[in-house]
Image: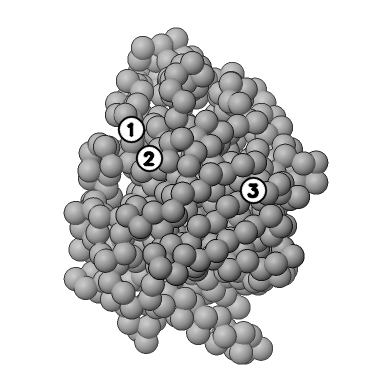
Amino acid sequence: MGIRILASKEVCFGRITYNSLVDIVNVKIIILRSGIIVVSRCLLITTGHEFQGVRGFLDRENNVCIALVAFVSFYSSCAFKFEKGKRSNVVLIVFDDLRPTLGRFGDRLAFTPNLDAFISRSNYFTRAYSQQALCAPSRNSFLTSRRPDTLHLYDFYSYWRAFVGNFTTLPQYFKEHGYHTYAIGKIFHPGVSSNYNDDYPHSWSASPYHPSTEIYMNTAVCPDAYGVLKNNLLCPVHVRTQPFQTLPDIQSTAEAIRFIKSYRNGTANPFFLALGFHKPHINFRFPIHYMKRFPLENFYNYTPDTFRPNEMPKVAWNPYSDIRSRDDFCNLNISFPYGPIPALLRAQIRQAYYASVSYVDNLFGKFIKHVDSENTIIVVTSDHGWSLGEHAEWAKYSNFEVAVRVPLIVQSPEFRASYHVGKSIKDIIELVDLFPSLVDLAHLPKVPKCIRNVPMFKQLLCTEGKSFYKLLQGNDTKKHYIALSQYPRPGVVPTKHPNSDKPKLRNIKIMGYSLRTNYYRYTIWVRFHPNNFSRDWSTVYGEEMYSHRDDVGEEINLVNLPQFNKVRGRLKNKLIAAFTK
């Protein structure tokens, strides 16, 4: 590929470093629409044998480095395409509350043929983690690549641009680099946390699309046995009986297909499309025929847990308040906060969850066949997981594995060789890694790391994550990565008022910080001060340690066993260091 490079002192765009090919120090570049790259005030040092075809010389008088570059990459992962018309499109698909209940992730009860087929053509991460198991904090975290403690958002009631700093978002970065960005459905959480407009126009080139039927998602549209409409948890429906005779995710899928089709004949600019499905978030409203795939008897013995484990600190418990508020649940008079839920309802909730997943899997399949995979980077993930009775808990609102672990699937034109596709990657990654990784996959200028001890409001573009691009290449696998998550509580014991599951900032008195390593999960619940966002590591309200070597369900808390004291001490120090750096 030939690249024309002109020298200039006046223009600059960003900084790049390709360490594996050539070391470039203080390079400022701009890629013009014509494919011309303008370089200003740089020093180029080649590494010799690793980068063939590079010739450079330094104009000492003008302090301008003019490099003529013409090379053919011998590695598919290094085949950069700078011409405007050949930049890959990007599709980001976000499910709501989706834990890895997918066939290719090893779930034998799942029926997800479309996602499974997609995974067989992709790379997928089996240990990807959310930073907080709540919609708005998680989404704002991975869309800005900042952790909840940086955004100071643990609830739904603040907008980071006004509250903390005018931080650049993932779609905004692509927009600033010439992409047409468009959102469909739920990407940012609606309301205050995205300024009531999904961060438009900062993040999006056009006003985001929301289905007209979204307004009915939490209203009485579920007919009971007598035909009376209720706001139920379990809500399989005949679609023709629903408002506008459709459902929100059906509408979003149609709009996504329309966008893809219209863009084929449209502008030459690449696009960044974000498609957010509402399901499997409650209520479980989906076409009733999906129930047939999931016999109820398969879900009675899903987990042995009926009661809260004795070793679980009370502060770690979430009383699943959103489920309790539904009409069909209220009628059962289940005791607060620990229940238990009757066996029949436990099986019905699991059945409905799996049917909801199968429903959106079908919609995913209808959409994905319209996407040109040869010129599109596609990432599929979720904002967090969802408990299905593990520890006798339900919903999200915790630091347990089932609440924070998500599927993350990546398909890229760059990794289409047979030895790349269908490959599971077991390295630990976080959703906060998504921003820098997509940037690297698109070969845009790298996102700088956030600098310790520099105020965040002075670092409007930076990442608190890492890029997993090298992991996709098959490199970087010897490093032992960790994942960090957190969850707030208003007090030591579960309460209705304030809501233990969704406390507002002013009511947060305790923060649970969680560390996931290759073999352990360690969680500590400490004093938190909402007025200045500080924490007191010496005031501990609960502590948990689970070994994933032989306790993947996180059932046995090892904190009080003396033989694990050294391991616990190391994990505690590692967690504190990670959250205070």
Mark 2, residue position: 175
Q: x, y percentage for residue 561? A: 61, 85
**In front of the other: 549 or 150:** 150
Residue beneath the point at 43% across and 23% down:
267
Viewport quadrant of the N terminus: top right
Using a 10 Å C-alpha cutoff, classify the residue at mark 1 as few (fewer than 14 neighbours), some (14 to 19) or many (20 or more).
some
Q: Which residue is mark 1?
A: 205
Tell me residue 20's x, y (percent): 65, 63
Q: Nearer the viewer, residue 331 or 364?
A: 364
Residue 391 found in image quarter? bottom right
On the image, numbered disc 3 is attached to which residue?
Answer: 70
Name the front one of labels 2 and 3.
Answer: 3
Q: Quadrant of the C terminus?
A: bottom left
- Residue furthest right as drawn: 418
Mark 2 or 3, nearer chain start: 3
- Circle 3 — which element? strand
Question: Label 2's element?
Answer: helix
Residue at 23%, 39% (x, y): give it.
196
